[in-house]
Amino acid sequence: MNQRILAVLVAFGAASAFVLAQAAKPDAPAGASKAAVAMAADSIAGKILYSGPPPVLKHHSANSEPDCEKKRPDGIMSQEVALNSDHTLQNVLVYVKEGLPNKQYPTPSAIVKVDQNGCMFIPHVIAVMVNQPVQFMDSDVASHNVHAMPGVNRDWNVAQDRGSSEITKFPKFEIGIPVRCNIHRWMQMYINVLSNPYYAVTGKDGTFVIKGLPPGEYTIEAWQEKFGRQTMKVKTGSRANITFKG
Ligand SMILES: [Cu+2]
């Protein structure tokens, strides 16, 4: 495996996931250190880990699209497992599944953006609330055809040319909606649609923080596209480390 490509992809995906995690929690105290946040009484924080043989990832050449090949001369590595050197995993959704009061949470108006750049979706995993707008952009010379294939929400299939943008929404809770490009078979990402605002996607250090919870015990679920789901009971103010086995 080309370590340099992996490192670049890992860094790329991590940056996106980190931005997403931050964007999902606009009330994060400015300048608060991770340690301080992790110890807050209204938070659950932790790490997502992987144990098992090193994952074998598919590699694709982008040579069918000159623009994308120029942007990614070393090709495109599958992002289905984004493993860090300390065995933590990026791009894992963590959300509160059980324990919250039965109420309706408002939908944020903030648009969550996904770019198509160098024939890749960036970021690779996003999380939004039900009916929150998701915007797909095309920063490539190449045309794309975005195809979201939900199980409970409605199929969404739209062609995009350079510079175009399309907005969609998903009205129902659903984890791990696969999104592909019908033109470039290697392009893949996932959308998670949540019914409460207590979620995060692990960033470049494989950690997560869910803030602003009423004190109590909750069941959290972690979802990873290849390894599936795991749940854990955890109290606010404490840490939760979850390990996926390969
Ligand atoms: Cu495409």
Image: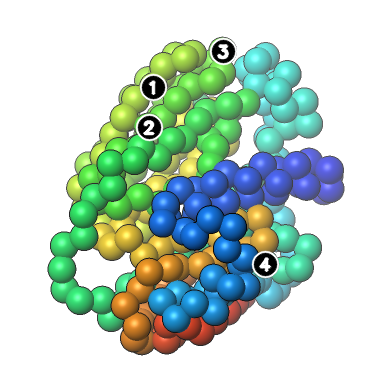
> Amino acid type of disc 2?
Gln
Q: Position of residue 185 (x, y in %)?
A: 53, 33
Q: Which mark is residue 141?
A: 3
Q: Which mark is residue 165?
A: 1
Q: Real-space Cα distance between discs 2 and 3? A: 18 Å
**Residue at 36 percent of width and 58 percent of height:** 175
> Amino acid type of disc 4?
Thr
> Amino acid type of disc 3?
Val
Q: Using the rendered view, name the quadrant where residue 208 is placed.
A: bottom right
Marked residue nearer the N-terminal end (1 or 4): 4
Q: Real-space Cα distance between discs 1 and 2? A: 7 Å
- From what the image shows, is residue 70 above or below residue 169? above
Q: Using the rendered view, name the quadrant where residue 46 is placed.
A: bottom right
Marked residue nearer the N-terminal end (3 or 4): 4
Q: Which residue is mark 2?
A: 135
**Residue at 54 percent of width and 46 percent of height:** 19
Q: Real-space Cα distance between discs 3 and 1? A: 14 Å
**Label 2 near label 1: C-beta < 8 Å?**
yes
Q: Which residue is mark 4?
A: 88
From the viewer's side, name the closer residue of 93 and 111.
Answer: 111
Q: Position of residue 220 (x, y in %)?
A: 40, 76
| Number of numbered discs visible in the structure rendering | 4
Q: Would residue 131 be visible to someone looking at this image?
A: yes
Q: Secondary structure at mark 2?
A: strand
**Label 1 near label 3: C-beta < 8 Å?**
no
Q: Would residue 227 be visible to someone looking at this image?
A: no
Q: Position of residue 199 (x, y in %)?
A: 40, 63
Q: Position of residue 101 (x, y in %)?
A: 20, 76
Marked residue nearer the N-terminal end (1 or 2): 2
